[in-house]
Image: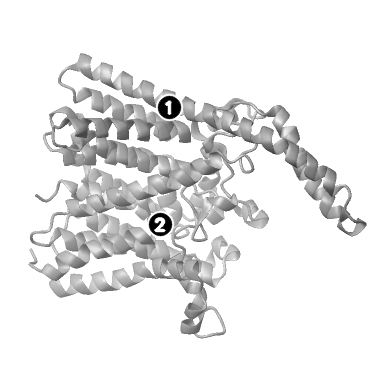
Amino acid sequence: MIRSNFLNFIVPILFIGIWLSIGSNPADFLLIFFNENSALINVKKLDLSGFVNFVRSIFPPICLIVCTFIILKFKIHRKQNNFIYIILLIQLIQIITTFLSRDTIVSDYEILIDHIGRYHWIISSIATITIFMIANKLENFNVKKLFYISIIFLSFIVVFFSYKILLDFFNFEINYNNLPVYNLEIWRKSAFFFKHEIPRVTGLSRSILVLLIFVMFFRYNNRYYNKILKNILIISLGTLIFLFQSKFAVSLFFIIFLFYFLCYEKKSVGLIQIIILLLFQILLFLSISNYKFHFIENKFQVNTTDITDQITKEDTVSTKSQSYSDSKKNKNTKLINEKKKFSEKYLRHNYSKKSKGLDLIDHVVLSGRLNLWLNSVPYIKERPLLGYGSMSDRILINKQRLISKNILNPVSNAFLYSLLSGGIFCFLLLILFFITIRSKYLDIIYFTVLNKWQNKISALILLVITMRLLIENSIMLFGIDFILLLNCLYLAEKE
């Protein structure tokens, strides 16, 4: 164990920096080196958003350098948990396979800056690993501090970005078809923050589930106002789950409530309380949707006259402005026509009406992921040992979309991603990782007899992450899942 007040102070700071770097893009700092001016001059030319993104994106490599120095100086790399070595080895393999991917089909679709950028998320993952390695060897440092930091960031993410999304949900100019939250256009102008995409509702739903687990199973003082606050938070978070309508999140939402029910000593009392909570959540979800409908109805009635008058006025413009007038008139006429078809829509669109047979099942159950998985198989067969390196799935299974500059889909399965990015060795290490932490999963089996809140919370969060492995790349890429995984593994390790 290492006794150092300085390291006890610096570790949380580094961890906060890693959280702030989530969502950054390596291009935010790499571009300053691919310019005729010096890097310093390019930095000075950045606007506020550009500078913030520059700092966020350059932090992981700086953090890695600092942590590597600390690890080597204090020989912290010795006697760590086996699972941390496995995760680290998975990252190192991806560095090698990314380097070797320069002579593959991937290189046909990327320039040098894109290739360099593919190392960025691996560096971020390794930096996060090194933070936990240091924290685990510090004397008088409770690793739960890092978990509390994660909860604070998740709370901010959920509150801030849910607010932005719900504003668009109520905005008729953005949502004039009265779409559910899930079906809002993800590339709308308001769906960006500091020039980067805000979290999608599927990612936000995962964060909501983690907060819900924390609120449900954290051990509070047994006071009346704590119980009221706890139930208010549960109702609010559950309502967001119903509003966002991620199938994965809704399914796990009910599983979490099942574990919540099992923890009640008096099952009849627990069942009644849970039914009441669920009713409040569903009623609040329907109330928000109904209020939104009537809010837009009233607002539209006021604005329809103005739009009609505007169309009339634009008919009198000069011939030089006629094309612009026609375009504007068509847009406004479209809004009026949409008003005639305007109806209340509570549930997301799960599939296209053209889908039939297995294609229909794929869209209803897996949201089209089956095609992504099948498309990855030929590439896995072509390079089973080495794969194609980090982030290669976005190129391999999206070649047509790269040409049309449409949204790029990940392969959406952590095990397939491991094969594509690191080959069979990366895949086997991922399997070995779960074998190594198998004891952590036993907490789910013995959930009701666990005495410590951190064991219950880490077990359920681990369940959420494990289920996401099947439908997302999840822990195979740096992000919230990756940080939460390390949080869970260490949460009850050190007392």
Residue at (35%, 67%) from the top-left corner?
60
Q: Secondary structure beneath disc 1?
A: helix
Choose top left, top right, bottom left or bottom right for residue 402.
bottom right
Residue name at image x 36 percent, y 54 percent: 426
Residue most extreme to the right:
319
Q: Position of residue 40 (x, y in %)?
A: 46, 83
**What number of labels is visible?**
2
Of residues 11 and 100, the one drawn nearer to the viewer in this rendering:
11
Mark 2, Cα crowd under 10 Å, few <14 / some 14-19 / many 20+, is: many
- For label 1, the residue is 284
Residue kind at label 1, given as amino acid type: Leu
Q: Residue at x 45, y 57 (%)?
A: 387
Residue 296 as seen in the image, left or right of residue 315: left
- Image coordinates for residue 18, horizontal then vertical, percent: 32, 61
Secondary structure state at the residue bearing disc 2: helix
Q: Position of residue 425 (x, y in %)?
A: 35, 55
Residue 76 numbered tag: none
Label 2 and label 1: CA atoms lie apart by: 46 Å
Q: Nearer the viewer, mark 2 or mark 1?
A: 1
Q: Amino acid at mark 2?
A: Gly
Residue marked by disc 2: 422
Quadrant where the image shows the N terminus? bottom left
Relative to 107, say whether 315 is above or below. above
Q: Quadrant location of residue 6?
A: bottom left
Drawn side of residue 47 relative to residue 8, left or right? right
Quadrant in the picture for residue 258: top left
